[in-house]
Each structure stands twice: as C-alpha cells, then as structure tokens.
C-alpha cells in the first residue's frame, strides 16, 4: 500500500481548534504500528506556488503566500504556508500514481474542501482535491470523481469546479445525504456511486472522520456505519476497476487518538478490500 507522506506535511497550530495539520505524522505512525510491512511510504515533490493558480485566483494565492492575507486557519504564519506545499503535493502525487499505475493509494492529508477559488476558510487554504483533479485531467484523464465524505459540504470544491469550468469532475458530498439516518445515507451512497461515479477514471475519496456521532462538529454516524461507508466505497471501486486515491479530512474529538482510530478503520477496510494489492 503506497502512502505518499513527508514530515514537512505536519505543522502544529496552537491557536487553531483543528488539529488536522498534526495528523499526518500520527496517522502514518499508527498505520505502520498496526499494518506493518503492508504500508510503503513514498516521497514526492511539493507543489510550486504557481500550481495553486491553476485552481485559485492568482491574487488570492499571492496574498496568502506572502503573508498579506489570512490562510484558512486565520493566521499569517510562514510555517503553516510552507506545510501547504506538501499537503497539496502529497494529494497530487498520490492521485497521479493512481492514474498512471491504475493502483489505488492514499494521501494522509486534510484541509482542502472549504478552500474556494478566491478565499479560504474552515481550516482550508488551498484545495488539493481540485488541484489533483485538474492535474489528472491535464495528464489525459477523461473524468474524475470527488467523493467527499467529510461531515460538512465541500463548498470550496463546488466553487472551484464552477469557477474553473471543470466539467469532467463529478462531485458529491456527504452533506447532500445526511439528515435521514445512517441506513438511508448508506443506501443513497450506493445509488450515488452507481449514478455519478461509475464512468470515472479515478475517484478521489475524502474519508472524513467528523461524521462520527461523538464528534463535536455535528457528526451522526456510528463507528460501524462509517466502516460500512468505507467498505461500500472501496468495494464499488474494486468492482468497477476504478483506482481510488483517498485522503483524510475532519475529526475533532478529544483525545485525538479517537480520530486516529477512525482513520485506522478506513485503512483496515481499504486493505481488506484488496484494492491495495498488499
């Protein structure tokens, strides 16, 4: 199982409620501890500042990068900004690997889907999901799916798809299907996979942890329901022979180990699906 990880992805932001920027290191260490030699860490190149301008307004990118405008965490921290080149770089590299090799993979990253074309927010500064999708399209992919199972609607992803005319991208967010109960959601997820994503070349799957019923940001799914969610997605991708590149997303429970455990469950379902080839 190829995991695209570099230590530079991690950053601690004491003033932020979200601890997601600390998660890559902790999640990867947990995966290595539980899944051992089934995990292979892969290095990658960080994105260049110019790369973000493919999906974001140039003036927004420059203002954030030059610390003249707040990033998605509400700071003007050079350390935070530097880490973003690696979070986006991980997502792009993992997605490209999935497209080129037709093998599923993972980017242990968060902080993408609230980043709009010309603004950030919600702990998201630059949208690595959209940048990855754009990159795959430029490399010849015909249709890319973005399946967003974070608790909250991916407003930034939707905004960029419209602003940049990314018509080959199919996007569906768990927020479209919540509110009717876990069983109804899982049924709708199955329907959405079939109707929206069956003809995709690659699926970018954001396996958010803040859907959990004990999450302070409004979650409503059980641990078992979230595992079934992941199982459905991975089983669909295997049946359709569509490579999936998945990443982390929200999760705000304390202690943080509870969030790490939910991401561990996703990795367990992924390895059980046979998609990893490991």
Image: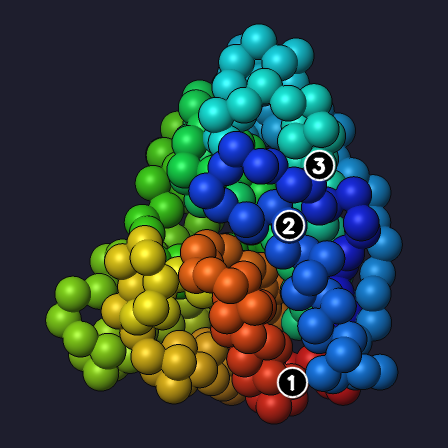
Numbered marks: total:
3
Q: Is residue 92 left or right of residue 76?
A: right
**In the rendered view, would you say 18 is above or below 32?**
above
Of 210 and 177, nearer the camera is 210
Residue 45 appears at what percent x and percent y?
83, 42
**In the rendered view, would you say 154 is above or below 251?**
above
Q: Is residue 146 visible?
A: no
| Image quarter of residue 108 | bottom right
- Residue under label 2: 22
Q: Is residue 153 left or right of residue 31?
A: left
Crowd around label 1: few <14 · some 14–19 · many ≥20 (10 Å): some
Tell me which residue sits at (80%, 82%) in the image.
36
At numbered mark 2, what does the secondary structure look like: helix, strand or loop? Answer: helix
**In the rendered view, would you say 255 is above or below 127?**
below
Residue 132 appears at what percent x and percent y?
61, 46
The residues tagged by marks 2 and 3 sit, at their Cα atoms, a distance apart of 11 Å
Q: Is residue 139 left or right of residue 57?
A: right
Crowd around label 2: few <14 · some 14–19 · many ≥20 (10 Å): some
The residues tagged by marks 2 and 1 sit, at their Cα atoms, a distance apart of 24 Å
- Residue under label 1: 271
């Amino acid at each position: 199982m190829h995991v695209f990880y570099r230590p530079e992805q991690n950053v601690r932001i004491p003033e932020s409620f979200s601890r997601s920027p600390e998660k890559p290191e902790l999640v990867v260490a947990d995966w290595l501890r539980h899944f051992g030699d089934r995990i292979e860490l892969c290095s990658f190149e960080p994105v260049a500042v110019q790369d973000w301008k493919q999906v974001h307004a140039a003036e927004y990118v420059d203002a954030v990068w030059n610390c003249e405008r707040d990033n998605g965490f509400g700071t003007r921290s050079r350390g935070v900004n530097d880490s973003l080149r690696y979070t986006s770089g991980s997502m792009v590299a993992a997605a490209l690997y999935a497209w080129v090799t037709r093998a599923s993979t993972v980017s242990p990253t968060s902080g993408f889907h609230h980043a709009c074309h010309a603004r950030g927010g919600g702990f998201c500064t630059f949208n690595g999901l959209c940048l990855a999708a754009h990159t795959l399209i430029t490399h010849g992919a015909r249709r890319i799916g973005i399946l967003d199972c974070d608790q909250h609607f991916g407003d930034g992803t939707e905004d960029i798809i419209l602003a940049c005319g990314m018509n080959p991208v199919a996007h569906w967010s768990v927020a479209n299907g919540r509110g009717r109960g876990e069983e109804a959601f899982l049924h709708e997820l199955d329907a959405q996979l079939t109707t929206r994503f069956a003809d995709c070349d690659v699926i970018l799957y954001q396996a958010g942890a803040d859907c959990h019923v004990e999450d302070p940001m409004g979650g409503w799914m059980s641990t078992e329901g979230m595992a079934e969610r992941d199982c459905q997605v991975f089983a669909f991708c295997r049946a359709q022979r569509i490579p999936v590149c998945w990443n982390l997303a929200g999760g705000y429970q304390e202690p943080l180990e509870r969030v790490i455990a939910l991401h561990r469950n996703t990795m367990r379902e992924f390895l059980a699906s046979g998609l990893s080839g490991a």
